Image (cartoon, grey):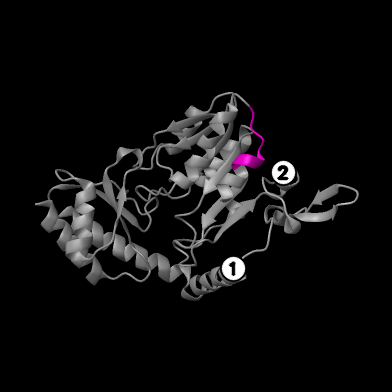
Amino acid sequence: EGINMIAHSLQLKEGDEVIISKHEHVGGSAPWYALRGEGVTIKSIELDLSGKNNLQIIDESISSRTKVISISHVLCTTGLRLPVDEIAALCRRKNIFSCIDGAQALGMFPIDLEEINADFYVASGHKWLYGPKGTGILYISKDLIHDLIPPFTGAHSLRTFDLDDETLDYRETAERFEAGTQNTSHLLGLGSAVDFIQRVGFGKIENHRKELYDYMLKRLDKIKGISILSSRNMSTSTSIITFRPDHKDYQEFNKQLRKEFRCRCRAVHENNLNAIRVSLALYNSKEEIEKLTEGIEELAK
């Protein structure tokens, strides 16, 4: 919803170009592709999954028509963490809007919006925050709020409205994007999720992530018949490990993991990776990783 708001508020024109990666989630890419009917061009680029050259790849993809770069903080496909602060800085130097999809980042590690300094940052509340579905956040730079016309308008988005005079004036804050009455219970749930993450602390979350990630990598390395697609560098890896069965259909492989070993993973069809994503959450344990990797080893034979 947040990316849709941005895509339809920027008033892009025919011939304008938006750059995204081939690893974007449908929620982060479809809103931009929907603008093609208005003559907007979408350039989808491949990334370096090792994490080494992505800033250069993005820089070299920019043209004179590029108006927006919309990219994930953490790729939903392999869990690669991108240098979004450097990408946002590149956009500022070239007078391009920067939009960061933080759906797979928020709650996984600390996010400093002032340090990233992107024009827009969007994230979900139900993933690594463990909050209610149907919640999320949309950050908009204060420098841009006044220039954006919300795609939806209602009582909550207006500072003044006079039906007799037929005049309206938008609020000068992000509330201009909240058209109607919000779901109070969902918002309270989102706030409770944030409180929970803060009580646990990102130090404990990060230590747990590193321990599980390293443990699973070592176990996967011993399994024949699979390829690991995720980064091995702790500075660019996250809580997501993606692997591909070398000689088995990934969809069927994933179904068997769930049915025979009661391990729920996510099939990765994006960019034709034909792989399986494992998310190592705060509540997961080494014992669960052992059960999962035993299932992977059995099915990979």
Q: Residues within 10 Å of mark 1 (few under 14, many from 20)?
A: some
Q: Report whether 257 appears left or right of 115.
A: left
Q: Nearer the viewer, residue 35 or 271?
A: 35
For residue 279, side relative to residue 127 (left or right): left
Please state the horizontal and vertical placement of residue 92, each as a whole percent of the image. 62, 38
Please tell me how many numbered marks the rendered image carries. 2
Which residue is drawn at the image coordinates 15% and 46% (left, top)?
Answer: 248
Q: Secondary structure at mark 2?
A: loop
Foreground residue among 117 and 152: 152
Give the mark nearest the N terminus, 2 or 1.
2
Res. 236 mark: none
Q: Quadrant of residue 254 in the image?
A: bottom left
Q: Residue at x 34, y 50 (%)?
A: 233
The amino acid marked with disc number 2 is: Ile
Along the viewing direction, whichever of 218 and 30 lies nearer the viewer: 30
Q: Which residue carries the number 2 mark? A: 149
User: Residue 29: x and y, percent?
Assistant: 48, 41
Q: Is residue 93 left or right of residue 105?
A: right
Q: Which residues are magenta?
A: 7-13
Residue 224 visible: yes
Q: Which residue is mark 1?
A: 187
Instruction: Answer whether labels 2 and 1 touch (C-beta < 8 Å).
Output: no
